């Protein structure tokens, strides 16, 4: 092919990237390939062929889902509402208790010897999944929605504290200094100087956690911690695919609704 | 009567090397309005932040007293400094208001040091306090903005809101750190006029750092000039001629003078220059 951009002068090759950079890029790709190869057999990824060989079974399975059975829709609706209620309470408690922990894990509010232990405690809350807490709380407070509320609450205190404290650490220090210069106390510096600056972000994070919690709450019932998860689990275990599919539709609609509403609200505050 | 501000052998080093202040000695009497001038990096802000008790000086025999009470000694901020900070209002180049709170709330913040802690923290201000805050806003001429968010105000309005906050705080000493550096000339003039008014009418001692010497000559009888962390001049503002500034600052003097100012001329506005007030402002403020 003949392309002439500059009729004056001979065509010249552009400069090549130096060897170090190219080697670095190849090393990155190679590392990724090695990590995937390492997990290939242990994760039984080779069984992907079964998806094709057992295609007939899959077809039967899917056919059951194509005819959702809404006979017990009132029960599904009741359980779905309960699920949202669990999520609301879990989020509320997490925010109420998360705020003090967030302030205690902000390096610009308290000294490092307070920040570090608080952060490690919050890491622990976050590291343990809601479902694990749900199992623990079912044992502690008995079967039912309250165990679910507690599970969401404890896990989310860790999440909320981390998200909120990141917002606190990013504030503009100058208004706080202005308030300090008036002779105000430490608590008042926080109330008047810090909180007004972070409140839009905090609201946004809270709504985002609410969305996540509604999703998480739909499976709490698997372990008896209340909500629609119990119905879902029972119908899957009983091979009631049309019921399962009806429950899934209810979950998808509700979660989408919550997501859309919360996104609208978030856009309003930011 | 103790001096409003007394500083003895104040030094401050940032990191290992950077000497921001060295061996500052200062006395400012109550009721004075004093300009603090100097090029960028000469230590004006650092000095003001030390007097406000926001930064600790180097260890050593150093003393900063405000109204006869210690703000910091030997590099340690005095315990219970909140009580003394209440007497000292500070206004900043960037205003340091809380942008999302209303102007009125920003002014009410000035009361926090004077009312019960729990009441302040919960935001339970009395009707009388709200009236006082509104009165302060009327005094600085921005009452109509009371319910707006502070962030929506112009720079000059924000600075006047900051002055209102210092007023309601009941401060007897006001430290102004480059209050007009980010304002247009008209707003700058209004802010400086507000400062001289509260100095004259309320007898509040004011130390105001300025970038341009014209404003010092126009509004403050006494000027302290700094260079590289040291006081190089302390005396009547009218003796600060362009020639003198060149002697002190050399090439850096251009930064301190508005470009179109002639020697000794004041080009800030077209008003005739008012007769200079005598040094003893308190005496002058009392009508005969």
Image (cartoon, coloured by chain):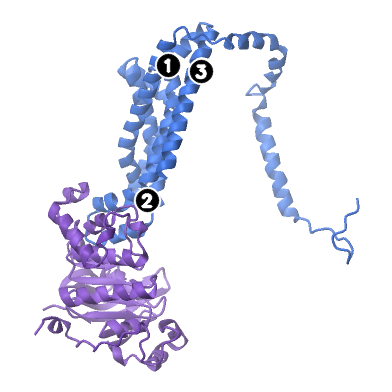
Which tag, 1 or 3, sits closer to the chain's start? 1
**Mark 2 burial class by Cα count in 10 Å: few <14, some 14-19, many 20+:** some
Residue shown at the point (44%, 86%) measured from the top left: B260
Residue shown at the point (68%, 31%) measured from the top left: A37
The purple-tinted chain is: B
Q: Which residue is mark 2?
A: A107
Q: Quadrant of the C terminus of chain B?
A: bottom left
Quarter residue B28 falls in? bottom left
- Answer above or below: position of A258 versus B171: above
Report how far apart the C-alphas of labels 2 and 3 lie in the structure. Answer: 45 Å
Q: Does the image show residue A108?
A: yes
Q: Chain of mark 2?
A: A
Horizontal placement of B208 versus A212: left or right?
left
User: Which colour denotes chain A?
Assistant: blue
Place of residue B114 in the rendered image (x, y in percent of width and height, measured from the top left): 15, 58
Q: Which mark is residue A249?
A: 3
């Amino acid at each position: 092919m003949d392309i002439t951009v500059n009729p004056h002068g001979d065509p010249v090759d552009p400069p090549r990237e130096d060897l170090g950079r190219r080697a670095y890029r190849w090393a990155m790709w190679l590392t990724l390939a090695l990590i995937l190869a390492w997990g290939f057999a242990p994760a039984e990824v080779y069984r992907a062929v079964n998806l094709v060989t057992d295609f007939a079974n899959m077809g039967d399975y899917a056919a059951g889902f194509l005819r959702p059975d809404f006979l017990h829709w009132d029960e599904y609706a009741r359980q779905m509402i309960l699920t949202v209620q669990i999520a609301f309470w879990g989020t509320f408690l997490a925010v109420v208790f998360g705020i003090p922990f967030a302030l205690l894990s902000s390096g610009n509010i308290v000294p490092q010897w307070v920040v570090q232990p608080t952060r490690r405690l919050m890491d622990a809350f976050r590291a343990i999944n809601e479902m694990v807490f749900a199992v623990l709380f079912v044992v502690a407070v008995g079967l039912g929605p309250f165990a679910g509320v507690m599970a969401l609450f404890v896990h989310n205190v860790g999440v909320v504290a981390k998200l909120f404290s990141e917002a606190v650490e990013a504030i503009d220090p100058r208004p706080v200094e202005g308030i300090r210069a008036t002779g105000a106390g430490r608590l008042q510096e926080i109330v008047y100087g810090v909180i007004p600056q972070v409140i839009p972000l905090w609201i946004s994070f809270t709504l985002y956690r609410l969305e996540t919690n509604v999703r998480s709450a739909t499976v709490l019932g698997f372990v008896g911690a209340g909500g629609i998860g119990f119905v879902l689990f029972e119908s899957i275990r009983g091979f009631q695919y049309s019921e399962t599919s009806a429950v899934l539709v209810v979950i998808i609609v509700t979660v989408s609704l919550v997501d859309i509403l919360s996104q609208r609200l978030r856009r309003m505050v930011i | 009567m103790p001096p409003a501000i007394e500083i003895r052998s104040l030094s401050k080093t940032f990191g290992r090397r950077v000497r921001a202040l060295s061996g500052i000695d200062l006395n400012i009497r109550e009721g004075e309005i004093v300009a603090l001038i100097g090029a960028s990096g000469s230590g004006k802000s650092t000095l003001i932040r030390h007097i406000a008790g926001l930064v600790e000086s180097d260890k050593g025999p150093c003393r900063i007293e405000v109204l006869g009470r210690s703000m910091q000694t030997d590099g340690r901020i005095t315990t219970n400094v909140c009580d003394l900070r209440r007497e000292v209002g500070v206004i900043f180049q960037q205003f340091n208001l809380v942008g999302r709170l209303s102007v009125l709330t920003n002014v009410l913040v000035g009361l926090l040091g004077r009312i019960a802690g729990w009441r302040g923290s919960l935001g339970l201000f009395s009707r009388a306090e709200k009236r006082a805050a509104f009165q302060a806003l009327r005094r600085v001429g921005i009452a109509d903005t009371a319910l707006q968010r502070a962030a929506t105000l112009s720079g000059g309005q924000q600075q006047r809101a900051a002055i209102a906050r210092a007023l309601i705080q009941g401060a007897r000493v006001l430290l102004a750190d480059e209050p007009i550096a980010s304002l247009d000339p008209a707003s700058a003039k209004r802010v400086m006029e507000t400062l001289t008014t509260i100095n004259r009418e309320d007898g509040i001692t004011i130390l105001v750092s300025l970038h341009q010497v014209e404003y010092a000559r126009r509004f403050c009888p006494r000027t302290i000039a700094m260079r590289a962390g040291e006081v190089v001049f302390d005396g009547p503002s009218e003796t600060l001629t362009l020639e003198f500034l060149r002697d002190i600052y050399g090439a850096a003097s251009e930064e301190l003078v508005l470009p179109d100012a002639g020697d000794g001329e004041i080009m800030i506005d077209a008003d005739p220059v008012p007769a200079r007030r005598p040094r003893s402002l308190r005496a002058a403020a009392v009508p005969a």
